[in-house]
Image (cartoon, helix red, strand yellow):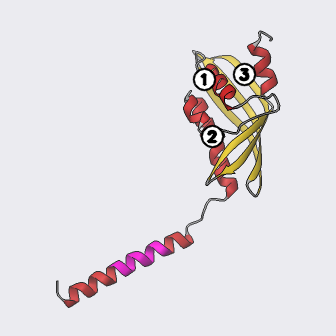
Amino acid sequence: MGGRGITWAVVILALIAAGGIAWWALYPKPTEEDRIRALIAGLERGIEAKAPNRVMAFISEDYRDDYRLRRKDLSFMVLKILRSEGDFEVALRQVRVEVEGRDAAATLEGEVTLTADSQALGRYFGTVTLTPRKEGRDWRIVSTQGWQQRVLHEAVGGS
């Protein structure tokens, strides 16, 4: 390659590098609130896909709630619930997220419906609070509130 070829190669590489730097500097970075909303969307997709591993990917190893459920307890419950016959549909009506440093709170109002053959087999409507915490670069849920009493009551045969 002659001197002109090297010059053009350097110019092209410089333009590519400048474009990459400009894109990185100008591209809107997701906020921590955006990342938590993405976590919630991932949970929703995992439930609707009946994929326990996808749901549990968002749960911290340090999970513990007011009912003294730990991650392994929650994992067992998620597995049992998602193995139910039929399909789950999650409809969130309102999502509020508050972030303070590495801690956050997310309040979800909505409904989860279990259907089979176009018929609702079960429906849960209510408010659930998630407590995400930043672990490394990702957010994980360390606690939840608002669903346990009903689910645990139904698990022991209540109505």
Secondary structure type for disc 2: loop
Q: Position of residue 99 (x, y in %)?
A: 76, 54
Q: Is residue 56 above or below residue 25?
A: above
Q: Position of residue 24 (x, y in %)?
A: 52, 69
Residue 141: quarter of image: top right
Residue 97 can be seen, yes or no:
no
Find the distance from the CA under tag 2 to the CA under tag 1. Answer: 14 Å
Are the residues flagged by discs 2 and 1 in contact, CB closer than 8 Å? no
Type of amino acid at the residue the image marks with label 3: Arg
Badge 2 is on which residue? 58
> Can you say which quadrant of the picture contains the N terminus?
bottom left
Q: Residue at x 60, y 34 (%)?
A: 55
Badge 3 is on which residue? 123
Q: Earlier in the sequence, mark 2 or mark 3?
A: 2
Find the distance from the CA under tag 1 to the CA under tag 3. Answer: 18 Å
Where does the magenta region start and end? 13-21
Q: Position of residue 131 (x, y in %)?
A: 76, 43
In the rendered structure, the answer to whether residue 4 lies left or right of residue 40 reads: left
Q: Is residue 122 above or below residue 126?
A: above
Q: Position of residue 122 (x, y in %)?
A: 70, 18
> Can you say which quadrant of the picture contains the C terminus?
top right
Badge 1 is on which residue? 79
In the rendered structure, the answer to whether residue 69 lies left or right of residue 11 reads: right
Type of amino acid at the residue the image marks with label 1: Leu
Residue 112: quarter of image: top right
Type of amino acid at the residue the image marks with label 2: Phe
Mark 1 vs mark 3: in front? 1
Q: Nearer the viewer, residue 116 or 52?
A: 52
Q: Earlier in the sequence, mark 2 or mark 1?
A: 2
Residue 52: quarter of image: top right
Secondary structure type for disc 3: strand
Q: Residue at x 31, y 83 (%)?
A: 10
